Image (cartoon, grey):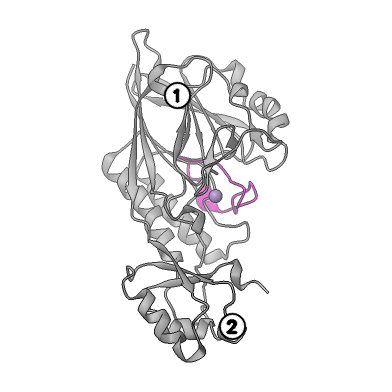
């Protein structure tokens, strides 16, 4: 039996902040998302895994302008043409369906457009990838049926991996580490098929591994979340971003098992809060913003907040136009809930 290597990434959210005809010339975050997507593909080109898996949310939403779809599929098509097969799970952001395109008919591109299983042969190892597109409602109760429809029980003669884009019990998100436990949209760990070598999933933006593959827990397979490749919201400000390089190798009885899981970090722009203090007046606002951003990394994404009691007249001055004038043009900014009407 030969070892098998898989590069796993997910939640690239391509198309986010990528206007085709921008009304205002300013830096956008869209190219950052494309950069990291391409960095993963370049890593795979150089390190030559047997397979690359995208765990879903390739795009940031369902309706994507055709030029952006073509840009993404062009990259994928070129990559697949170089000989490494690519498996994609449609995520919730693309509403469980990838935009259709002739590009996707490339024989090296495998999409879980419905519950199904793809068989691969690497050296003398067979690997089966079973999966289904994101189930957006009641995955907990639908899960047994989804698994059955992949043909899971009938597969024999190689390692079996399960791929999806869902929340699994025990997954953690957010700055306070909220942990998903129960709920109609959470898959129970105990429902995962015990004969899976691993579960590869997108959806949870913080990279994490549920379970310990080294212990060889036979009760429940390890669940591997590579996380998003860029910070999609301030809830992810302290998270490292990247993807996994996973190695499976034969054990003493010749069956494949997880051997190594390496996290490869990607550059993600810093996120900083800028809190407008309630002592700020209209005539001191610009200087306040300049002074408080002077020491920040110029590549930062700024979140505007305001202290309780800030003069509404000052608050109303904090417009996109003003921020573009005052902040370094390398910075991006967004408003917090403090600015909601
Ligand atoms: Mn996502």
Q: Position of residue 290 (x, y in %)?
A: 38, 81
User: Crowding at label 1, few (<14), some or many (≥20) Cα neighbours within 10 Å?
Assistant: many
Question: Which SS does the magenta portion mostly show?
Answer: loop
Q: Nearer the viewer, residue 53 or 10?
A: 10
Secondary structure beneath disc 2? loop
Secondary structure beneath disc 1? strand
Residue 122 relative to residue 60: left or right? left
Residue 248 relative to residue 20: left or right? left
Which numbered circle lies on residue 161? none
The quarter of the rendered structure image containing the C terminus is bottom right
Give me the residue at 45% from left, 82% from top: 324
Quickly name the residue at label 1.
127
Is residue 263 highlighted in magenta?
Answer: no
Residue closest to the far left: 46
Q: Position of residue 165 (x, y in %)?
A: 57, 40
Residue 150 relative to residue 28: left or right? right
User: Crowding at label 2, few (<14), some or many (≥20) Cα neighbours within 10 Å?
Assistant: some
Say whether mark 1 is within 8 Å of ligand 1: no
Quickly name the residue at label 2.
311
- The number of discs equals 2
The quarter of the rendered structure image containing the N terminus is top left
Mark 1 vs mark 2: in front: 2
Question: Which span of residues is magenta-colored?
Answer: 86-109
Q: Nearer the viewer, residue 68 or 276?
A: 276
Tell me whether the residue at label 1 lies in contact with that at label 2, contact meaning CB atoms closer than 8 angstroms: no
Is residue 102 highlighted in magenta?
Answer: yes
């Amino acid at each position: 039996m030969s070892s098998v290597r898989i590069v796993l990434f997910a939640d690239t959210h391509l198309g986010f902040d990528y206007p085709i005809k921008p009304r205002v010339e300013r830096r956008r975050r869209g190219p950052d998302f494309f950069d990291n997507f391409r960095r993963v593909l370049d890593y795979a080109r150089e390190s030559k895994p047997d397979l690359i898996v995208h765990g879903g949310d390739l795009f940031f939403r369902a309706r994507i302008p055709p030029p952006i779809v073509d840009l993404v599929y062009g990259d994928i098509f070129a990559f697949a043409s170089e000989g490494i097969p690519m498996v994609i799970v449609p995520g919730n952001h693309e509403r469980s369906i990838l935009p259709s395109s002739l590009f996707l008919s490339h024989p090296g591109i495998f999409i879980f457009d419905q519950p199904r299983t793809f068989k691969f042969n690497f050296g003398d190892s067979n690997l089966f990838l079973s999966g289904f597109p994101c189930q957006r409602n009641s995955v907990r109760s639908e899960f047994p049926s989804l698994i059955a429809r992949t043909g899971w029980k009938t597969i024999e003669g190689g390692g079996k991996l399960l791929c999806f884009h869902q929340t699994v019990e025990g997954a953690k998100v957010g700055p306070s580490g909220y942990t998903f436990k129960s709920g109609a949209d959470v898959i129970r760990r105990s429902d995962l098929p015990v004969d899976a070598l691993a579960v590869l999933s997108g959806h949870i933006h913080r990279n994490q591994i549920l379970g310990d593959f080294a212990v060889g827990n036979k009760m429940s397979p390890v669940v591997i979340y590579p996380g998003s490749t860029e910070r999609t919201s301030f809830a992810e400000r302290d998270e490292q971003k990247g993807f996994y390089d996973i190695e499976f190798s034969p054990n003493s009885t010749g069956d494949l098992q997880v051997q190594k899981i390496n996290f490869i970090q990607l550059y993600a722009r810093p996120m900083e809060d800028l809190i407008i203090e309630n002592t700020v007046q209209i005539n001191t606002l610009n200087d306040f913003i300049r002074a408080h951003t002077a020491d920040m990394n110029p590549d930062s994404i700024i979140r505007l907040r305001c202290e309780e009691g800030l003069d509404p007249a000052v608050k109303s001055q904090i417009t996109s136009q003003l921020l573009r004038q005052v902040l370094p043009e390398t910075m991006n900014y967004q408003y917090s809930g403090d600015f909601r009407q």
